[in-house]
Image (tube, rainbow, N blue to C red):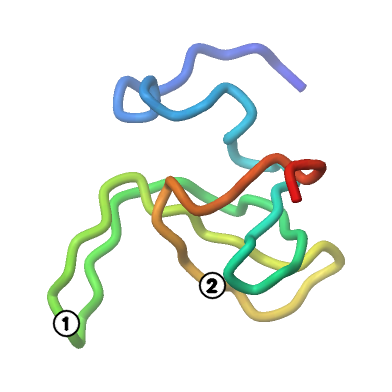
Amino acid sequence: MIDAPRPAAHQALPAWLYEGAKVYDPGRDREAVVQAIADFEDSATRRVIKNAVFLRPEGGGIEWIVDPGVPRPPDGR
């Protein structure tokens, strides 16, 4: 992994939460890999999530989106 500076919008996020990191989503009771962290607007509700975390199961599968406060380190069950 290359140590590049974090984008300014991601500075407030925990150091362990970055693209490619393995995390635990307690809402789904499963581990996942962070695919991206970006602002997201739900087209149905028009709700905007700043620094939304896009997750996908390790090994592939359907992606889902959570608020940045939801994921935990994988050992943080």
Q: Is residue 20 left or right of residue 51?
A: right
The amino acid marked with disc number 2 is Trp
| Circle 1 residue | 45
Q: Quadrant of the N terminus?
A: top right
Q: Is residue 55 above or below residue 76?
A: below
Q: Residue furthest right?
A: 59
Q: Residue furthest left?
A: 46
Residue 62 image position (x, y, % from top left): 65, 80
Q: Secondary structure at mark 2?
A: strand
Q: Is residue 55 above or below residue 13?
A: below
Compare residues 33 and 29 and report the one nearer the observer: 29
State which quadrant residue 58 falls in.
Answer: bottom right
The amino acid marked with disc number 1 is Thr
Q: Residues under labels 1 and 2: Cα distance?
A: 16 Å
Residue 63 image position (x, y, % from top left): 59, 73
Q: Is residue 41 left or right of residue 33?
A: left
| Circle 2 residue | 64
